[in-house]
Every structure is written in structure tokens, then in C-alpha cells.
Amino acid sequence: MKIRLYPLNCYSHSGNLKPPVFFYLVLLFLARTWAVFIISVILRDADNPLLRLFYPNKIHFYLGLGSGCIGLLLFFLCGRDHDKHRWLSILWQSSYPLLLAAIVSDLALQLYYLSDKHFQYSFVASVQLVFAIWILLYCLRSKHLKDCFKRNS
């Protein structure tokens, strides 16, 4: 196994490799339904037009919340010192396949939404689909991201 070295600013104070900045944008994209949910809760409107705008069908909203849970979990895990707790370290190391599964499930949900509308063109849907494909390709090809999920020796 070849060990890759990164600049010192890529490591935390405890010596763990920090995720790249783009990883946080990936997590934000995966948890976008949760962001809309939090904004709608802050607005405290029972019949929120923001929710109706992004999610006219309530089942799409609930499916988006479900698929965004992995993104939220990874967001909370990425800032922790994994060497202090063994179970946290094991959970973090096994999270890379979970990240890929979250991206694939997001892609599947977007294709389901498109099929529900008989594949009519929508600018928002096409931008989300392109972003999801870019994110999947990034996560599959990024050596820095893969190394973040490996155990430090």
C-alpha cells in the first residue's frame, strides 16, 4: 500500500487527515431537503409556500429527508477526533460506502421525480441531476477523500 503525503494544513491537530473542502459542499447538497425543512420551521408557517415550491408532493419531501440523513450523519462525524473513541473510528472508516450509497440514492430519487413528471424538462431538476453526477464522479475519483476514511497509522 502506497502512503500519500499531504500538506500540513490538510491534517488536524491530532494528526488525522481532514476532508477536502468540496466534501462539505457534497454534504450540503445531500442534506438540502433538511436545509429547506429548517428554513420552513424558522418561518413557522403551517402552509409554507417554500415547502410547496420545492416539494409539491409531500412524499418527495419525506424521501428527501430520508436520503439526507446520511449526509447529516457524516457532517457530524467529520469534525470529531476519531482516535479518542474506537466505535467512532469504526463508524467513520465504514462511512465511505455510506456516502456513495447516499449519492446513488439521491440520483435514484431524482430519476424517480423525473419519471413521476413523465421526464418533462425542468431547469432545477436538470441542474440537480448534473450536480449529483459530478458529485458521484468526484467521490469515486478523489484520492484525498478516500484517504480521509482510512485509518491513520
Image (cartoon, rainbow, N blue to C red):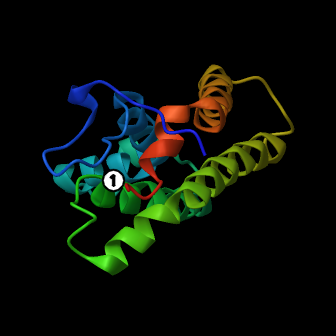
Residues 56 and 129: in front is: 129
Residue that badge 1 annotates? 75
Residue with the most extreme bottom position: 87
**Residue shown at 43% from the left, 71% from the top:** 91
State the image quarter where residue 119 is shown. top right
State the image quarter where residue 139 is shown. top right
Residues 66 and 47: in front is: 66
In the rendering, at what x and y percent does residue 10 appear? Answer: 28, 31
In the rendering, at what x and y percent does residue 127 appear? Answer: 61, 22
Which residue type does callout 1 highlight?
Phe
In the rendering, at what x and y percent does residue 140 appear? Answer: 65, 37
State the image quarter where residue 24 is shown. top left
**Residue shown at 24% from the left, 57% from the top:** 41
Q: Secondary structure at mark 1?
A: helix
Residue 28 visible here: yes
**Residue shown at 48% from the left, 44% from the top:** 147
Left or right of residue 153, residue 14 in this image: left
